Image: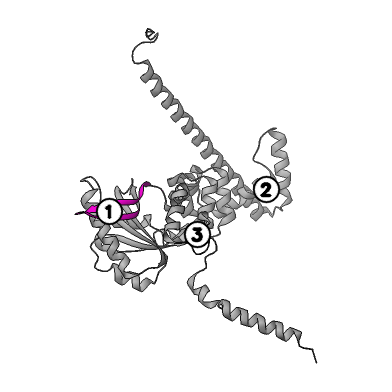
Amino acid sequence: MTHQPSLFPQGYDAFFKRLKERIQSARIKAAWSVNKELIILYWEIGNDILERQNREKWGSKVITRLSKDIRQAFPGTKGFSPRNLGYMKSFAESYPDIKIVQEVLAQMPWYQNCALLDKLSNYEERLWYAHMTVKEGWSRNVLVAQIETNLYARQGKAITNFRETLPEDSSEATQQVLKSEYNLEFLQLEPNYKERDLEQALISHMRDFLLELGTGFAFVGNQHRLDVSGDEFFIDLLFYHVKLKCYVVIEIKTTEFRPEYSGKLNFYINVVDDQLRDETDNPTIGIVLCGDKNQAVVEYSLKGMSQPMGVTTYRLKDSLPEAVKRALPSPEVLAEELKTAASEAKEPKP
């Protein structure tokens, strides 16, 4: 079969590819421009309603009338229900500075802004989640999930030795990558699971795990083999962080953190730096992901270590904080109390 010569001039395919990219880029910019104008319009409408209610004592019925009049004036126009007008008022009331709206909030779709109003009352937290949504490109569902798992309180709060082991210009950025606790509810592990079970569950749910780890993590492999002069060692999980430009070693422990874990992690980081890291990579960092931790024990264990590492914990669906667990009665005590209560219930009342 003979090859048919192209009917189009040489270079057409490359030209068409670039043209498609430009059209797509223009569409995205146009969509964002429309979204920005819409968010600013909603703020202005909410601000006007707020001012009228404060100055002229308009009641809530005015919003219902306003909604009806707008929809009559612009048939088919959506977004001006009484409920949405109420959101506009709350939006303007929550963010009195229009500059914040223009610079950050107008870069988010309206229903993500509504989610912030519904889920959070603290101004600083709202702005933090708004900045993160714009930076990471979160959908509404992801944003809500991050709020409900309290990412604001977890982000950058892991115990580490980064200040002592990394250059000053990179230690803070690396610190912000780690969380004090990781939410692994999506694993749905059975009771009495082992470390191997936890590791396999993370591999099976890697997409969810990468989302919880945060933007920038690329999975390299599990049980990654290291050969040290004929002796074999295996890293539980190995990642590469594309923004920090470094390897990330994760050791999984279902127990409370123990001092020897940091020594083992320090060893793994040294080997990865020697065998995998090249001249363009930043220093490898290590993470011990464990079931619980004593902060003082962790701090003493990391003190003096030569390699950058941190210690974090994870939470499963039905897990309780250790302090709460200690406050609860043991099964034996609870059984005895139930037995006593049952016995007392059978005794005749005087």
Q: Which residue is mark 3?
A: 150
Q: Nearer the viewer, mark 1 or mark 3?
A: 1
Q: Earlier in the sequence, mark 3 or mark 2?
A: 2
Q: Which residue is mark 1?
A: 284
- In which quadrant of the rendered image does the C terminus lie? bottom right
> Gap in Å between the C-alphas at discs 1 and 3?
28 Å
> Gap in Å between the C-alphas at discs 2 and 1?
51 Å
Q: Residue 224 in magenta? A: yes
Q: Is residue 14 above or below residue 124?
A: above
Q: Is residue 350 above or below residue 200?
A: below
Would you call the spot at circle 1 few (<14 residues within 10 Å), some (14-19), or many (20 or more)? many
Q: Which stretch appears magenta?
A: 215-236
Q: Nearer the viewer, residue 115 or 347?
A: 347
> What residue is at 32 percent from the left and 53 percent from the top?
248
* Type of amino acid under label 3: Asn
**In terms of secondary structure, where does tag 2 sit?**
helix
Would you call the spot at circle 3 few (<14 residues within 10 Å), some (14-19), or many (20 or more)? some
Q: Nearer the viewer, mark 3 or mark 2?
A: 3
